Image: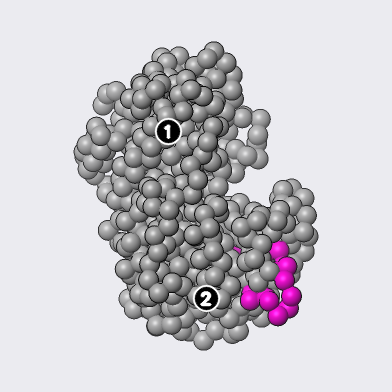
Amino acid sequence: MRRTGRARRVAVLGSAGTLIAGTLIAGALSAPAASAHSAGQGQDREARGTAIAADRAEKAGIDWKNCDADWGLPQGIQCGWVTVPLDYAKPYGKQIKLAVDRVASTGTKEERQGALVYNPGGPGGSGLRFPARVTNKAPLWVKTSKAYDFVGFDPRGVGHSAPISCIDPQEFVKAPKADPVPDSEADKRAQRKLAAEYADGCAERSGEMLPHMTTPNTARDLDVIRAGLGEKKLNFLGVSYGTYLGAVYGTLFPSHVRRMVVDSVVNPSREKIWYEANLDQDVAFQMRWDDWTAWVAKNDATFHLGATQAQVQQQWLKLRAAAKKSPLGGVVGPAELIGFFQSAPYYDSQWVPIAQTWSKYVAGDTQALIDAASPDMSDIAGNASSENGNAVYTAVECTDAKWPSSWQKWDRDNTRLHKDYPFMTWANAWMNLPCATWPVKQQTPVNVKTGKGLPAVLIVQATRDAATPYPGAVELHQRFKGSRLITEKDAGSHGVTNLVNPCINERVDAYLLSGTVDSSDVTCGPHATPKP
């Protein structure tokens, strides 16, 4: 379910490895959060712990300074830290620091409405580049930036916020990896061994953090950040996994929400988090892959990859078979190809560049594809960031919920799905298989629902989204009473609010600037289809 904002995301487990599948985020507080925690003494303790931590953060504030140069953020962005408990049931125990950054609102004092906090997804994505939408003068965000400070943060375990790790980063990116699609039971055994070793590696390298790497804890962190910012209530924009973070926050702290936009929605049903949600992805990725290959065929005069969708698909199978027989450039096998090509079903913005790169390869210019799909072993910092993102993805999804421990169930479900939805199914299975042998206690997901004081939440979703299938938005809409759903029909790019579609853009602005929503749900036409 991972969404990090990168054009391509390749993650591996050990030397044979596999890849990410897409994915898969105030005044002193009394304890209103406790009323939102209906189940159990442990949750009551965590609610009290959150109130204590938020009170401390409100009193301390955030000491904003120029960001360290090696953080790679544009001029004009300020950085700071918010301290939170590792374990909210023990608020006076071990503390960790979360990295936050901001750009101040560009409007007048009268126009300012507070801070807008962002999470890009993952789990494992950093939100620190969000304020760059202001410094870069991104047209879609000019109006909103007059009213809000744009605030990003690294969630717990991510980037600069007590980062976790599960494997040596250089081993993590080493290529080529084994073909994710198994040819034999021996192939499956090898992948199962790697997944178990990866889970063990998470415990060995990040054991203290691991039991506390959950979405509810990140939601509690978000409330402490709100307090540190000096905000009575939270304004939040979440994309992909960030929508689930928002859903959990809205459930635990309904009266602390002022405005919330969730874009490309994770299905918040307890039955879907997280095993079933990943199976649903496999179906949706195949749908969107077929959309893209049909578009490539429609533009055969430009790309010369086949005049029908079936012909383009045959070219893909031919490329995949060639890379399996002999890795392209010695480093690009089927796993690396999927890691590169999966950006097309993720994002429309990648339709043209990926088709162009593929077209060059078929025409005899092979280097562009090799360069694009292979890891850069010299990029030490980038590889460490990729490994960290994968570690957080795994830790949060595996700890958030109970996963099947029976290999027979995994094998049966993925074998069945692969027959009709082969593009991502086995790659996604291996990506998530460490959860089957996860070394710390797996939690019960929060029962996402409307609580007292929750305002209207704005939900935005494309019908053909691959990473977060459309039914997830409908599910959250039903659970958050009074919410409004904006549907982008016949579109499938992941992350809608940052694309040009006036039907959507104007409503997001109206909601964030004045709190207004339509009297009923809205269906918008698709944004412009990419042109070669």
Q: Badge 1 is on which residue?
A: 295
Q: Amino acid at mark 2?
A: Gly
Considering depth in this image, is 85 or 248 the residue closer to the camera?
248
User: Is residue 218 visible from the viewing direction of this image?
Assistant: no
Residue 454 coordinates in the image, percent (x, y): 43, 78
Mark 1 or 2, which is nearer the eye? 1
Considering depth in this image, is 161 or 504 the residue closer to the camera?
504
Q: Secondary structure at mark 2?
A: loop
Residue 138 coordinates in the image, percent (x, y): 66, 55
Q: Amino acid at mark 1?
A: Trp
**Is 378 placed above or below 279 here?**
above
Quadrant assignment for the C terminus: top right
The answer for how far apart the CA atoms under marks 1 and 2 are is 38 Å
Q: Residue at x 42, y 57 (%)?
A: 524
Q: Badge 2 is on which residue?
A: 515
Q: Residue at x 53, y 58 (%)?
A: 502
Task: Please tell me in which quadrant of the rendered image residue 399 appears.
Answer: bottom left
